[in-house]
Image (spheres, helix red, strand yellow):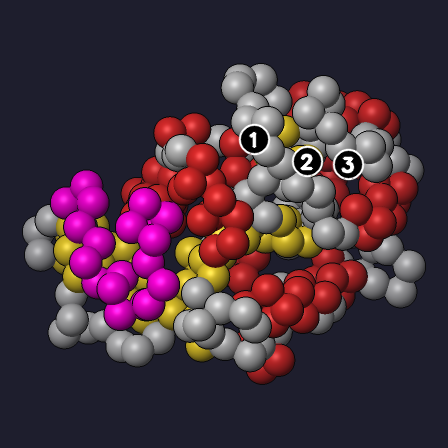
Amino acid sequence: MIVLLSPAKKLTISGNKPSSFSEPEFINEAQKLIKELQKYSPPKLQKLMSVSTDIAELNVNRFANWTTNHSLENAKQAILIFTGEVYNGLQASKLNKTELAYAQEHLRILSGLYGILKPLDLIHEYRLEMGTKLKVGKHTNLYSFWGDVISEKLNDSIKNHSDKTIVNLASTEYFKVINTKKLNANVVTPIFKDGKNGDYKVVMMYAKKARGMMANYIIKNKIENPANLIGFNEDGYYFNPKISTDKELVFYRN
């Protein structure tokens, strides 16, 4: 069983870093994207990414200083560099060595720049959303650039797992890079809804944190069977079997 998360827009290179780390699989592909991004001035990058002037300038500098060398001196483990609601829920800094080792086998983070990351992969600070319409050679966007590469890597990763299930805790924008027709696995998507006056809806801010909490729950309990996901009851959420299916596990919170 493998769990998928999206990255976060916010990152921090500061803070404690464990001594154990791994290297991203697709640094060469990331370098191709960086070379293209280095052609962009702050105004052009601002238009491409629909971001503020400050964020555009920050990322022009990040891309200019990006290097294929990833070390504990200039990079940080993916599971710890991202901040934001999902990663507030994940609480990666509180995971012990055994839990991080489990996450390394069972958790993957999708990335516009790096494709797909293991939790302990060292990465540089960057901003590149998967939905960005960056032209690279014959490719008009990142979905085209990555093609089936990420799906094939997932197949390679899950082939040694006893349960061939992908738990999709990623956003729609990121999961779209997966070619499910070529995936040698079942996909299960947990959905988190909050209730008000009897009406239950996905509130994105809460749902993002819940995705992180579910990932934490899986890691802490070393869950290897998707049937055990229904026991998730963090922060007031509970499984609703009446509207759930084999493909979508719906959790309510009153």
Marks 3 and 2, how far apart at CA = 21 Å
Bounds of the magenta span? 218-236
Residue under label 2: 123
Quarter-wise, where is residue 61 in the image? Answer: top right
Give the residue at x 73% y 23%: 74
Residue under label 1: 81
Is mark 2 in CB contact (under 8 Å) with mark 1?
A: yes
Along the polypeptide, which appears first: circle 1 or circle 3?
Answer: 3
> Which amino acid type is shown beneath numbered disc 1?
Ile
Q: Position of residue 254 (x, y in %)?
A: 11, 49
Q: Is residue 234 magenta?
A: yes
Q: Is residue 134 left or right of residue 217?
A: right
Q: Is residue 200 left or right of residue 210?
A: left
Give the residue at x 41% y 42%: 99
Q: Position of residue 16 (x, y in %)?
A: 53, 19
Q: Is residue 48 magenta?
A: no
In front of the other: 92 or 115: 92
